[in-house]
Image: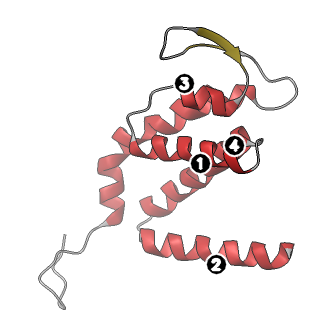
Amino acid sequence: MEISKYSNKKNIDWGKFYIETENSQVEFFTEITKAIKSTLGPSGMEKFLQKKTGEMIITNDGATILNNLIFFNPISKIIVEVAKSQDFEIGDGTTSVCLFSLELLMGIKSLIKDGIHPKKNFQCFKKGSFTCNSIFK
């Protein structure tokens, strides 16, 4: 890392930071995707789950699956909150919203790996959301 000429703080090499944390963060993408991707669509598969109370349930609802699984990764917990808010607001589409969010995160991985600052990624997503909103209005 190099020292910035404007401050005493070190500049973060985001590509190197990504590589160092990639191994610990990559599993949560596949963890959630495996749990809910096969339930999507008209020929979606049912899942056998054991609730926290010990009761067994059979479901293909993404929100139910995510609510009954225990995640330790903070980003996985955010995805579960996305599912809960989608279920509360609309009542449907939890699996699609979670898979869409995960795909966006996987797309960001390559940008961060190339050294693009996360703030720049956020600005692009914000600009894209404003563009989509203006198109749909």
Is residue 16 rendered to the left or right of residue 108?
left
Q: Residue 99: where, in percent of width, then height? A: 66, 43
Q: Nearer the viewer, residue 121 or 112?
A: 121
Q: Is residue 62 above or below residue 26?
A: above
In the figure, residue 37 lies in which quadrant? top right
Q: Quarter of the image for the C terminus: give it.
A: bottom right
Q: Residues within 10 Å of mark 4 (few under 14, many from 20)?
A: some
Q: SS at mark 4?
A: helix
Determine whether the residue tagged by mark 3 lies in a helix, strand or loop: helix
Q: Which residue is under mark 1?
A: 82
| Image disc number at residue 87 | 4
Q: Secondary structure at mark 2?
A: helix
Around disc 2, counting alpha carbons within 10 Å, would you say few (fewer than 14), some (14 to 19), or many (20 or more)? few
Residue 106, position in %: x, y? 55, 50
- Between residues 109 and 87, which one lies in front from this camera angle? 87
Disc 2 marks a residue whose amino acid type is Lys
How much space separates mark 4 and mark 2, taking CA atoms? Answer: 26 Å
Left or right of 5 in this view: 85: right
* Residue type, label 1: Val
Give the mark nearer the N terminus: 1 vs 2: 1
Residue contact between numbered discs 3 and 2, judged by CB atoms under 8 Å: no
- Residue 68's label in the rendered image is 3
Q: Which residue is mark 2?
A: 127
Earlier-in-chain disc, 4 versus 3 = 3
Residue 43 position in % (x across, y down):
86, 23
Q: How is the image coloured?
A: secondary structure
